[in-house]
Amino acid sequence: MTRHTNVRLSAGEDGPLRKSRPPVSSKDTCLFVVPVWNEGGKIGTVITEIIDSGYSVLVVDDGSTDNTYFEAIDSGARVVRHGLNLGQGAALQTGFDVAQSGDRAALVTFDSDGQHRLADAISMVDPWQKSQVDVIFGSRFLSSNQGIPRG
């Protein structure tokens, strides 16, 4: 998923080769990928919050039939569009493919309906930058306070 540029291999204390990231600002190298389908009325607020925090946003409009596409553009996101709804997995894959054509070191996938808290996503970016792991997953199912609305 993540494409590293200028990756160096170095021997760790335990001996195996590990990837080493060059020091960079996470805001400069982190892209939020937001798959979206018919979220007009909500997507603008989500995008604005991310952009106001200093991050770039790539929206993959998965064949929306409402004003989602135009609202995403008007909110300042880069937008790519599927001609018809292919599903969230295909939208994420499109986002990953587009992101690989740039020099982003990190991708954050983010829901378009306002259920994800931006602070939670950002809280994973800096630890990732300082670690030697390739992937960090967050889950709202790890605590008893899930607060997920039905439907």
Image (spheres, grey):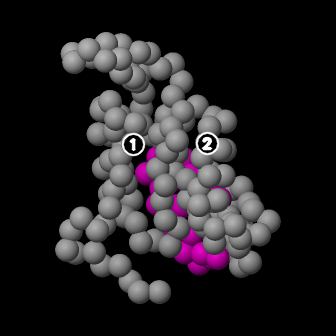
Callout 1–callout 2 Cβ contact below 8 Å: no
Three-letter code, disc 2: Ala
Q: Closer to us: mark 1 or mark 2?
A: 1
Tell me if residue 5 can be seen. Answer: yes
- Residue 99 bears which disc, if any? 2
Closer to us: 43 or 51: 43
Q: On the rendered structure, is 72 left or right of 124?
A: right
* Segment tinted magenta in the rendering: 38-60
Instruction: Assess disc 2: are there few (<14), some (14-19) or many (≥20) residues with their C-alpha within 10 Å of its C-alpha.
Output: many
Position in image of residue 53 (x %, y %): 43, 51
Residue at (31%, 18%) from the top-left corner? 16
Tell me if residue 77 can be seen. Answer: no
Q: On the rendered structure, is 120 left or right of 68?
A: left
Residue at (64%, 59%) from the top-left corner? 90
Position in image of residue 52 (x %, y %): 47, 54
- Residue 135 bears which disc, if any? 1
Residue at (36%, 21%) from the top-left corner? 18
Closer to us: 35 or 28: 35
The residue sitting at the bottom extreme is: 151
